[in-house]
Amino acid sequence: MGLFSKDIQSFEDLFMHGLQDLFYAENQILQALPGMIDKAPSAELRAGFEKHRKETEGHVQRLRQVFDLLDTEPKGEKCPAIDGILKEGKDLMGEIEGDDVMNVGLIAAAQAVEHYEITRYGALIAWAGELGRTDLIPLFKANLADEKATDQKLTSLAEKRFNPQAEKKTSASKPKSTARRKTAKPSRAPAKAKRALARKKRAG
Ligand SMILES: [Fe+2]
Ligand SMILES: [Fe+2]
């Protein structure tokens, strides 16, 4: 189950572990995305998640092709890292109140997933090269390109939120710009969050 619960004695074992890990992760992400689509208040964010859900189906298929090229049955290895990232995102969604905060929270949660995938694909690409399996690299690179593009799209959505020129829809509670947000009176912060901060201060 964990990295050390089975024997990884060679570079090949390590590569196979990484591949099975990522196969498990992509499948878990595929299951988590519909929940994120449901929760996203922004239509643009929903559309972005839906696009990436379809891409993620393709990621699973490409990893199946990798297993095929290795003459191995596709198999997932439970990955505590992606389980933790997805669980944190799900827990956060359950705790957020308000559309604006939900959009921002979802963007950050989704970027944590993309960054996880980016590091894992980066390692597999390097290891495939080391092992002389350059035939696998284009498949990993195709998935990696989608993850990077998604991450950039999420960054631009987050930035747009703080740019009134780029965001036509505004709400009374939405800060008009980053600068204004920085100078906004603390009293505008949600009372719940303020109480939580005060509790933390007392505890710490
Ligand atoms: Fe992916
Ligand atoms: Fe992804």
Image: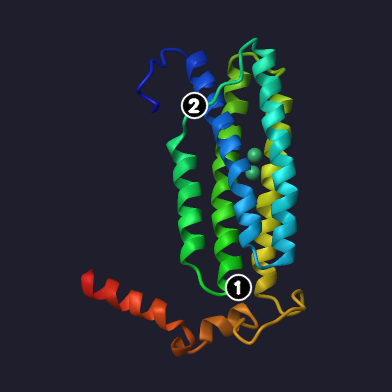
- Residue at 74% of width from left, 78% of height from top? 169
Question: Dot 1: within a 10 Å radius of its alpha carbon, few (fewer than 14), some, or many (20 or more) residues?
Answer: some
In this rendering, is residue 110 above or below 98?
Answer: above
Describe residue 9's horizontal placement relative to residue 198 as left or right.
right
Residue for point 61% across, 61% down: 39
Q: Would residue 144 appear left or right of 183 to someone viewing this image?
A: right
The dot on residue 77 is: 2
- Compared to 185, does 58 lie above or below? above
Quarter of the image with the N terminus in it: top left
Point out which mark residue 99 bears: 1
Q: Residue at x 41, y 13 (%)?
A: 9
Q: Is residue 111 above or below residue 123?
A: below
Q: Nearer the viewer, residue 56 or 13?
A: 56
Q: Position of residue 74 (x, y in %)?
A: 61, 20
Q: Residues within 10 Å of mark 2 (few under 14, many from 20)?
A: some
| Picture coordinates of residue 57, whole percent (x, y) | 71, 37
